[in-house]
Image (cartoon, helix red, strand yellow):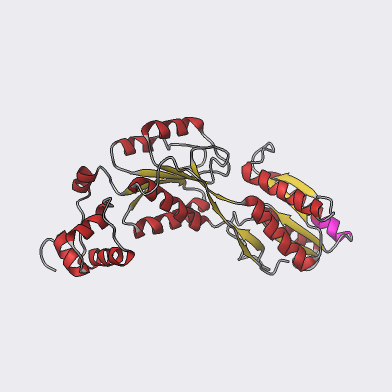
Amino acid sequence: MKGRVTSKDVAQRAGVSRSVVSAVLNGTPGIGVSEEKRQAVLRAIEELNYRIDAHARGMRTGKSRCLAAYGNLDNPLFLQVLQGFQQRCRAHGYQVLLYGTEEGSDGRVGLIDLFLQRRIDGIVTKDTTGYSDPDWLDRVREYGIPFVSVEGYPETDGITSVLMDYAESIVMALDELYARTGLAPHYLEVYEGPAYRPNWGDRERLKAYGDWMRARGFRPQVHTAARAELDGMAAALAERAAAGDWPMAILSNWSAGAVSVYRAAYRLGLGIGRELRVMAADNTDRVNGYLVPPISAVEVPYPAMGAAAAQRLIEYVEGTRSPEDTENIWMSAHLVPRESV
């Protein structure tokens, strides 16, 4: 099409009225638009290469139709969250502002200025599991910023968090491991940093392991190691198996623990899936499907968590959900059985 494409052209191509096009573009309240019509408008926009004057629209509506995604750019888990977040935003006609930080820094306060300048309508953060920052929440509440956290604030009221049920994930893993081996699993608990300070998620996992073992008359066997000392703990478990305590079933809270067990088993000539039956309670390092044999795991559904965060944020921005409704969003893990057990 030659010349400047207008909303009238989009309406004609989509077979809808201009008010429907406006409702799709601006999220106009009070005008119901079916999903079929919304998709027709979005297709027409793409086919006609229609360019929206975001500044003019923002002046009319007070909205930018842009949502900020904040997280650690060094963390591949944030990129998974971003994948689901961007897909859901795109489906609703929102742009995404990637506002990244690096390991050891926290520059999220700059997002408040962007919100006050009407350059973004809301914020999603990918936080470390159990993260909590009262000062940040005070500022979010002070300015009425639509906000959702992925994995942060699990024990804080008044803030929407997207969380995985870590206790459920451990029970899921233990049920699978026991069904396939008939063995009482050892629990290899890995932690970061110089001191043992388990976050909310790992506390939930550890309790679920102990409860599951005791309910079946087994004595919990927990082996805790800092990540820097993990190979030594894995070697001790493998040597115990090599001395005759095999087959041995091991569930690690992180995939890094399972990888260390693989290394120790290789050095001692033990077979994964034979003398050592190994499973991971997450896929933190994204390696579970690539080792030989691949590690059975309970996968954290980060893309789905990002999509759920975007959906809730859009509901806040568009007024279809009250900002007082901050019920947490709980996601179930995905069990992926592989050859390591």
Looking at the image, residue 178 sits to the left or right of residue 254; the answer is right
* Range shown magenta: 238-243
Q: Position of residue 212 (x, y in %)?
A: 76, 53
Q: Position of residue 121 (x, y in %)?
A: 33, 44
Q: In the rendered image, which quarter is residue 339 located in?
A: bottom right
The residue at the point 51 percent across, 53 percent down is: 76
Looking at the image, residue 200 sits to the left or right of residue 105; the answer is right
Residue 271 seen in render: no
The residue at the point 18 percent across, 47 percent down is: 56
Q: In the rendered image, which quarter is residue 41 located in?
A: bottom left
Name the chief secondary structure element in magenta: helix
Is residue 239 found inside the magenta-colored segment of the image?
A: yes
Is residue 103 found inside the magenta-colored segment of the image?
A: no
The C terminus sits in image quarter: bottom right
Looking at the image, residue 280 sits to the left or right of residue 99; the answer is right
Q: Position of residue 111 (x, y in %)?
A: 37, 38
Name the foreground residue: 240 vs 65. Answer: 65
Q: Is residue 335 above or below residue 312?
A: below
The residue at the point 68 percent across, 36 percent down is: 195
The residue at the point 34 percent across, 46 percent down is: 319
Name the foreground residue: 200 vs 159. Answer: 159
